[in-house]
Amino acid sequence: MGDTAKDIGIDLGTANTIVYARGKGIVLNEPSVVAVQARSGAALAVGREARDTIGRTPGSITAIRPLKGGVISDYAAAEEMIRHFVRKAVPGRKSRPRMVLCVPSGITPVEQRALVQAAERVGASTVHLVDEPMAAAMGAGLPVSRAHGSMVVDIGGGTTEVAVISLGGIVAAWSLRVGGDRLDSAIADHVHKEHGLLIGERTAEAVKLAIGSAGPVPEDPDLEHRTFSVGGREKVTGGLPHTLELSAAEVRAALDESCEAVVSAVKSTLEECPPELADDVMEHGIVLTGGGALLPGLDLRIAAGAGIPVFVADDPMDCVALGTGKCVENFDALEEFLADW
């Protein structure tokens, strides 16, 4: 079994990776980015240090995000990133921790195997997988083991996972490649198309965090009138720097399609759900987790579209990691939620 004190759970996210260590809680939360030497492919920096290089690297250095849509897109960089984070979270050369890895519900067996092999190569003694929406529901404190329908919508960096859970299993689920990254790119695409201005992903994210919304926000009526200044390169002038004022209404319009896709996924999942469980969800509401849950007005928009109350979980960005941590803390009792490899 190894040293159970070194068991860890990893929420390997498209935007951020969070590591939970048994008995310690969350010990690491860093961006899922690796800076590599273009010619040799050698990793120069990982995590926060690497993220600071995005959009600012010389031609000889490339900033890579090894995961896209919740799955590995660059295996060598992903393995290097996992190795770095595990060493940082569990110091000691001889540590061979048991690992619980979180995976999107729509992941294929081939993608699952790739994740497991990467974890084994960095030193895991055994690897267990847990579905992301199940971990999110556990982290949000939902009664996943009971004969009672609970609905969770986890909006991460790369995917949105929608699931209805009962008796420790996922009864109905929908996984779509819409998340924080898609919202950022929607803003960048809008600015490019409407204003002829090229902005980077970090600038687009800053716009989203400052004035982004999915609909009216009653508790923040001033949001409607806010603007945000962005700097980028102007297409017409051949790439000269230019500054532009964006309005909150304009940004909301840019995010509309992505937000509507989330609402549609919620409705589709409810349509697949047995009537008794749908009644439970109607009575107790839907819980939002993940970084996307913090987009102002999204809870109200989903509630209006589905006709069901929606609540944002406490610490939504940590719910998946905390749920994974519950599995780490009590492997035996929570074995029903884990897939073994």
Image (cartoon, grey):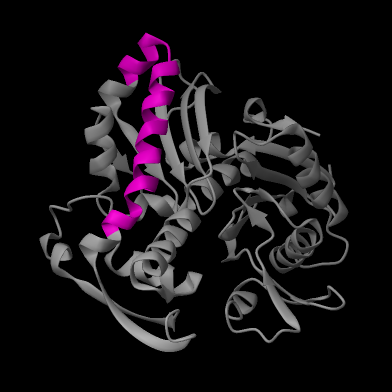
Q: Is residue 260 magenta?
A: yes
**Farthest bottom residue?**
240
Q: Quadrant of the C terminus?
A: top right
Q: Is residue 21 above or below residue 171?
A: below
Identify the residue at image location x=30%, y=80%: 244
Expressed as whole percent of the image width and height from the top left, the position of residue 142 reads: 42, 33
Q: Quadrant of residue 231?
A: bottom left
Q: Is residue 148 among the parts visible in the rendering? A: no
Expressed as whole percent of the image width and height from the top left, the position of residue 269 reads: 43, 24
Q: Is residue 59 above or below residue 318?
A: below
Q: Is residue 272 above or below residue 111?
A: above
Q: Is residue 11 among the parts visible in the rendering? A: yes
Q: Is residue 23 magenta?
A: no
Identify the residue at image location x=33%, y=33%: 286
Expressed as whole percent of the image width and height from the top left, the position of residue 203 reads: 43, 74
Identify the residue at image location x=28%, y=22%: 282
Of residues 83 and 21, the one drawn nearer to the viewer in this rendering? 83
Of residues 315 and 53, the one drawn nearer to the viewer in this rendering? 53
Identify the residue at image location x=28%, y=29%: 306
Q: Quadrant of residue 51?
A: bottom right
In this image, 9 relative to 326: left or right? right
Of residues 12 and 266, the one drawn nearer to the viewer in this rendering? 266
Q: Quadrant of the N terminus?
A: top right
Q: Magenta region: which residues?
A: 252-280
Of residues 33 and 134, the one drawn nearer to the viewer in this rendering? 33
**Farthest top residue?**
275
